[in-house]
Image (spheres, rainbow, N blue to C red):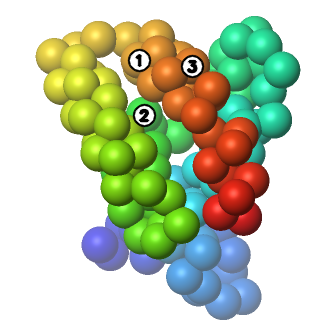
Amino acid sequence: SVSMLHMAVVCDPTKVREETLLEVSGVVPDSVVVELLNKTRQAKSTEEVLHAVRAYLLEGYSAQQALEKILEMLAADPSLPDLFKAKCANLLSMVDERLCQGCDEELQLFFLFTHLWLPLPALLHKAG
């Protein structure tokens, strides 16, 4: 924790802020996951979904953290049907298991977001 505080001071010597600590610790901000979901929702093709996933990973964020954030966001959204949430949780658990077994992050996130891609536009438009 001292190392993390030291890195935060190096990044912003004037003031240590919560955002700086989160960035230094490698936590994926909610806004990044929301942006990934929005890009997926707006995608016109699987190529655009793949581009959004690659952009997320090129920022250095972890697939595992994305799964956790997505599950939290879906579970907390009262406008989404329970059946959709259950199907998403099942899909997320499948991807999580594959990641724990050492499967490629890009392939697993691409699998996840292409399966979420079709139902997301209608559901997220209604929710947001």
Q: Is residue 76 above or below residue 32?
A: below
Quadrant occupied by the N terminus: bottom left
Determine whether 62 is above or below 118 in the image.
below
The residue carrying mark 1 is 108
Q: Which residue is mark 2?
A: 63
Comes first in the chain, label 2 or label 1: 2
Q: Position of residue 85 (x, y in %)?
A: 37, 49
Q: Position of residue 70 (x, y in %)?
A: 45, 50
CB-based contact (under 8 Å), mark 1 and mark 3: no
| Picture layout, residue 127 above or below residue 1 | above
Residue at position x 70%, y 58% in the image: 126
- Which residue type does callout 2 highlight? Ala
Frontmost of labels 2 and 1 is 1
| Camera-side residue of 122 and 38 | 122
In the rendered image, which residue does mark 3 sit on? Answer: 114
Classify the position of the C terminus by image quarter. Answer: bottom right
Question: What residue is at 57 percent from the left and 62 percent from the top?
Answer: 30
Could you tell whether 33 is left or right of 76 in the image? Answer: right
